[in-house]
């Protein structure tokens, strides 16, 4: 497939559709979106409870964020909405200052994300190593699984909750297993209807037909409501308010973008297509800014619902748009029907998402990949479960960077030989940076070397200021010993940065290629994309 067609530049609803897409594909997209909408309801309500806000705040967020990112996001097929990763950060803000401060924080969060998109910083998601990505996927799968366990609790009559036992537990587990079995076997019978949607329908009809006393969506909260109203957050426009909401806004923006961009990469890998990181940042920012002005709690990409959409056949923007509009329709017109859906059916769907999301191959490859990569994978998984995604990813990247620096520090070495005129040549290979400075310095012997020394950087590269400082110190050592040092194949930028020290040495400058840390897909020229 030509990658030029994968950045979502075409008309809304047509990106990444299969060649010759037809009515059948549109039907698949609509049914997939409907399935996602059903799975969004209990999640949005539950996360609203976590953040100590009204359930409609979570539902409005899922609708607004989901719709805007579906239309303008960087990855067709991704689903966004209110998430637990953001909800847990909001708790203390809502408890200490009230929900109006949350709305103001969400607006500021969105503006920060828009800035990240305009600065095209989303491309740096490419710096996240693959073991961190695997750890993120595994950790999030475990988090999704643990989140479903709350549905196996019932009220204890004293304002608390206790685990189900006896027949209620057996019935709940039976319905969950029935849902999972239906999702597994229905595709072998027919693919006309997405398996998760069909499974929810079968279990719901069974429960209603047999009048089974099991927990239903309506037991969580009523989802009936009207259209969200435009609402300017009622907070004092003072420096004190800004100081209160800024730390929360930065944390929420970071968590939202990290989770969204990692989900973007995961969906892109599953579908074999590309997505625009900076475009996704902009879409998330606009979505959250708008949500804050309509009484929403903000949101980001949802890996669980994104997996449901992709596995149900959703590949176009139409599926995400359908999910958002269906959710609004549930709130306005169909709340009484949706509230009859048994929670067991939705738990079964999410358990299948967990099975499909977890990278089971990671168990197999742990014995074959480098030990430090295996450690990072397990570490990120554990921290995602124990703490949160943003902390896990940052820790994983830092550990991976330190390991890389340590490994690279051991690679610098030199081949030496004496020329016919008695000069000594050090032919370096390996990177020169802060981690390898000590090894670099140990390669030379200014006291015993001949009067003229050549250092060839043709197979080496100076990466940072520490490397330049090491070269400067080495030149001073040879100068103090009354000897001449010649540097060859240094790049122009290195020569300029050596500055005033350049008079101590003879620098031979040759052209050196320019290196980029990361490239945003949106920035690639068409001829580079093929």
Image: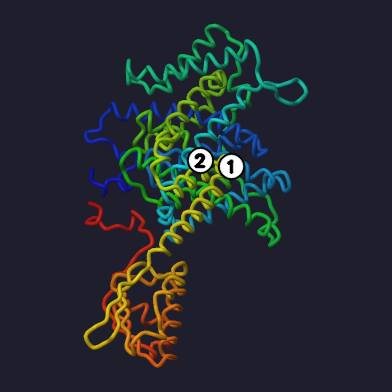
Question: Which residue: 63% across, 25% down?
Answer: 220
Question: Which residue: 52% across, 47% down?
Answer: 256
Foreground residue among 505 and 165? 505
The residue tagged with tag 2: helix, strand or loop? helix
The residue tagged with tag 1: helix, strand or loop? loop
- Is residue 429 toward the left or the right of residue 384 in the image? left
Residue at the right extreme, as displayed: 158
Above or below, 398 relative to 356: below
Residue 420 is situated, as x and y percent measured from the top left of the image, at 21, 85
**Crowdedness of circle 1 by 10 Å Cα count: few (<14), some, many (20+)?**
many
- Name the residue carrying label 2: 64
Question: Which residue: 51% across, 49% down?
Answer: 393
Q: Look at the numbered discs 2 and 1 and tell me whether their residues touch, using CB distance below 8 Å.
A: yes
> Would you say residue 273 is visible in this rendering?
yes
Mark 2 or mark 1: whose residue is earlier in sequence: 2
- Name the residue carrying label 1: 296
Distance of label 2 from label 1 (alpha carbons)? 8 Å
- Is residue 357 toward the left or the right of residue 101 in the image? left
Above or below, 88 relative to 481: above
Residue at the bottom extreme, as displayed: 482
């Amino acid at each position: 497939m030509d990658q030029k067609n994968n950045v979502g530049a075409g008309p809304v609803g047509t990106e990444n559709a299969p060649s010759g897409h037809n009515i059948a594909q549109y039907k698949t997209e609509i049914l997939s979106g409907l399935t996602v909408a059903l799975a969004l309801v209990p999640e949005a309500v539950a996360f609203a409870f976590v953040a100590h806000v009204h359930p409609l705040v979570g539902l409005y967020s899922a609708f607004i964020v989901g719709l805007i990112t579906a239309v303008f996001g960087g990855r067709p097929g991704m689903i966004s909405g209110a998430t637990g990763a953001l909800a847990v950060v909001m708790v203390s803000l809502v408890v200490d200052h009230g929900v109006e401060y949350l709305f103001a924080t969400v607006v500021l969060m969105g503006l920060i994300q828009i800035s990240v998109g305009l600065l095209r910083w989303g491309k740096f998601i490419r710096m996240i190593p693959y073991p961190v990505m695997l750890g993120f996927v595994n950790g999030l799968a475990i988090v999704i699984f643990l989140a479903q366990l709350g549905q196996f609790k019932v009220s204890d009559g004293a304002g608390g909750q206790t685990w189900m036992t006896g027949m209620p537990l057996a019935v709940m587990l039976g319905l969950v297993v029935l849902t999972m079995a239906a999702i597994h076997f229905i595709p072998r019978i027919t693919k006309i209807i997405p398996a998760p949607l069909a499974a929810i329908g079968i279990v719901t009809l069974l429960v209603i037909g047999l009048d089974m006393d099991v927990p239903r969506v309506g037991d969580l909260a009523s989802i009936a409501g009207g259209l969200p109203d435009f609402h300017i957050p009622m907070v004092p426009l003072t420096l004190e308010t800004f100081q209160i909401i800024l730390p929360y806004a930065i944390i929420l923006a970071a968590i939202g973008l990290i989770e969204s961009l990692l989900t973007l990469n995961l969906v892109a890998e599953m579908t074999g297509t590309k997505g625009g990181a900076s475009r996704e940042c902009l879409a998330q920012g606009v979505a959250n800014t708008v949500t804050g002005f309509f009484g929403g709690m903000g949101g980001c990409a949802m890996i669980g619902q994104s997996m449901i959409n992709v596995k149900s056949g959703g590949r176009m923007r139409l599926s995400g748009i359908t999910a958002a509009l269906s959710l609004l329709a549930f709130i306005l017109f169909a709340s009484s029907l949706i509230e009859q859906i048994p929670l067991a059916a939705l738990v079964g769907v999410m358990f299948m998402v967990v099975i499909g999301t977890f990278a089971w191959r990671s168990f197999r490859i742990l014995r074959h990949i480098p030990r430090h990569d295996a450690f990072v994978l397990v570490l990120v998984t554990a921290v995602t479960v124990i703490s949160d995604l943003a902390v896990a990813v940052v820790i994983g990247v830092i550990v991976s960077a330190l390991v890389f620096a340590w490994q690279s520090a051991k690679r610098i070495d030199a081949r030496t030989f004496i020329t016919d005129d008695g000069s000594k040549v050090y032919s370096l290979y390996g990177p020169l940076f802060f981690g390898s400075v000590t090894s670099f310095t140990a390669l030379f012997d200014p006291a015993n070397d001949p009067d003229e020394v050549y250092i060839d950087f043709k197979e080496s590269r100076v990466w940072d200021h520490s490397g330049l400082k090491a070269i400067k110190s080495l030149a001073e050592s040879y100068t103090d010993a009354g000897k001449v040092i010649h540097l060859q194949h240094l790049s122009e930028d290195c020569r300029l940065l050596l500055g005033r020290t350049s008079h101590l040495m003879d620098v031979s400058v040759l052209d050196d290629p320019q290196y980029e840390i990361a490239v945003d897909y949106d920035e690639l020229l068409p001829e580079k994309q093929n």
